[in-house]
Amino acid sequence: MSKEVIYIFIGGGTGSALRYLIQLLMHERIVPYHFPWATFTVNLLGSFLIGLFYALSERFHLPFEVRLFLTTGLCGGFTTFSTFSSDGVGLLKGEFYGAFILYTLISIGIGLAAVVAGGYVGKA
C-alpha cells in the first residue's frame, strides 16, 4: 500500500467522524427536520474547505501527500453526495417538493460559491 493511500485513508476516516459529530449536534439542536440541515452544512463547509485547501497547498507548496490528506481524504470523507441524494429522495417521498427544489438549487449554487470563496481566502 502506498503512503498516498494511507494519507487518504486517515483523512477520510477523520472527515467521516467529523461529519457524524456535526450531524449529531445539528439533529439535537435543529427542529423540525423537514430540511436536511446537517448534510447541507457539511457539504457547504466541505466545499469551502476544499477550495481553501487547494489554494493553500499551491500558495505554501504543501507536499502532495498533505494535499491528498486534506482534499481527497478529509473533504472526501466529510462531504457526502450520496447522503445529499438520499435526503433529496426523502424530501420527494415526503412530498416536500418546494424544500427539495430549494435544497437542490442552493446546495449546488452555494456549494460552488463556497469552493470559490475558499480558494479566494486561501490566496489572500
Image (cartoon, rainbow, N blue to C red):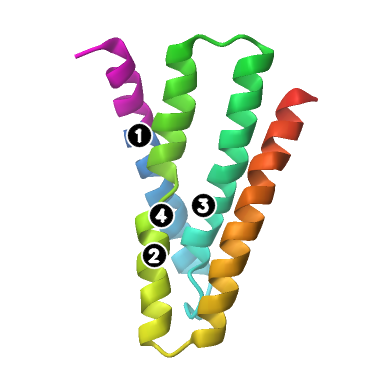
Which residue position is annotated with label 3? 43
- Distance from Cα at disc 1 to Cα at disc 2: 20 Å
In the picture of the structure, the residue carrying the numbered disc 1 is 12
| Residue 83, quarter of the rendered image | bottom left
Circle 4 — which element?
helix
Which three-letter amino acid code belongs to the residue tagged 2?
A: Ser
Q: Which residues are magenta?
A: 1-11
Number of the front mark, 4 or 1: 4
Q: Is residue 79 above or below residue 24?
A: above
Q: Which residue carries the number 4 mark?
A: 81
In front: label 1 or label 2: 2
On screen, residue 92 above or below 39:
below
Label 4 – label 1 distance at C-alpha: 14 Å
Question: Going by the image, does 79 lie left or right of 30?
Answer: left
Picture residue at 47% right of the left edge, 12% below the top: 64
The residue drawn where x is 66% and y is 25% is: 55
Name the residue at the bottom extreme.
95
Are the residues flagged by discs 3 and 4 in contact, CB closer than 8 Å? Answer: yes
Mark 2 or 3: the one toward you: 2
Separation (CA) of disc 3 from disc 4: 8 Å
User: Mark 4 touching mark 2, by CB under 8 A?
Assistant: yes
Residue wearing tag 2:
85
Quick one: SS at disc 3? helix
